[in-house]
């Protein structure tokens, strides 16, 4: 988990990354929480369309009064998501490939919304880890060491 450790220690900038790691979700959550980061898990293995993604990400991020209507609303609401008193927030999106394969346009919009949040310096730090294999995408891999 050295790439994750570097991210959580502040040696790697928060961003959207591909992460090829087989650690158990509980172990990733424990590492994040031990480093005082909020952990959010998004199980994407059954998400194949925009509607399903918007509902799932709203539930995972505990967005109050969010109806999952479109990516514009999601982008607006992501600015309200905070690390709940922690140093930052790490979102582990397991199984991103079903959406990427079934609805490339929705996948790109999801990456845009999540990437916008990870680059927003007016909010708490946020990193998004796309875990698992899938089609070739233009997203950097989480580096193994300081970046």
Image (tube, rainbow, N blue to C red):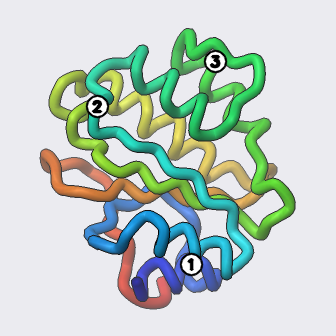
What is the x, y in percent for residue 72?
A: 59, 18
- Mark toward the viewer: 3 or 1: 1
What's the mark number on residue 23?
none
What is the x, y in percent for residue 14?
A: 57, 65
Q: Secondary structure at mark 3?
A: helix
Quick one: label 3 or label 1, which is nearer the N terminus? 1
Which residue is found at the position 43% from the left and 64% from the top?
Answer: 25
Residue located beneath label 3 in the image: 73
Residue located beneath label 2 in the image: 46
Residue located beneath label 1 in the image: 31
Please tell me how crowded label 2 is: few (under 14), some (14-19), or many (20+) other residues with Cα within 10 Å: some
Please tell me how crowded label 1 is: few (under 14), some (14-19), or many (20+) other residues with Cα within 10 Å: some
What is the x, y in percent for residue 120?
A: 69, 49
Check contact, mark 3 vs mark 1: CB within 8 A: no
Query: Does 51 sit left or right of 47 as displayed?
Result: right
Which residue is found at the position 35% from the left and 32% from the top?
Answer: 108
Q: Secondary structure at mark 1?
A: helix
Query: Does 1 sit left or right of 30 as displayed?
Result: left
Q: CA distance from mark 2 to mark 1?
A: 26 Å
């Amino acid at each position: 988990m050295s790439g994750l450790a570097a991210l959580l220690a502040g040696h790697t900038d928060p961003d959207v990354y591909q992460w090829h790691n087989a650690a158990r979700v509980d172990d990733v959550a424990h590492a994040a929480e031990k480093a005082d980061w909020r952990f959010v898990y998004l199980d994407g293995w059954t998400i194949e369309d925009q509607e399903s993604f918007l509902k799932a990400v709203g539930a995972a991020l505990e967005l109050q009064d969010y109806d999952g209507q479109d990516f514009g609303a999601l982008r607006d609401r992501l600015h309200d998501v905070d690390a709940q008193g922690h140093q930052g927030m790490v979102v582990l999106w397991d199984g991103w490939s079903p959406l990427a394969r079934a609805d490339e346009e929705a996948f790109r919009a999801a990456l845009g919304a999540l990437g916008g949040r990870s680059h927003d310096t007016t909010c708490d730090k946020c990193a998004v880890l796309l875990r698992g294999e899938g089609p070739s995408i233009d997203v950097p891999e989480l580096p193994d060491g300081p970046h």
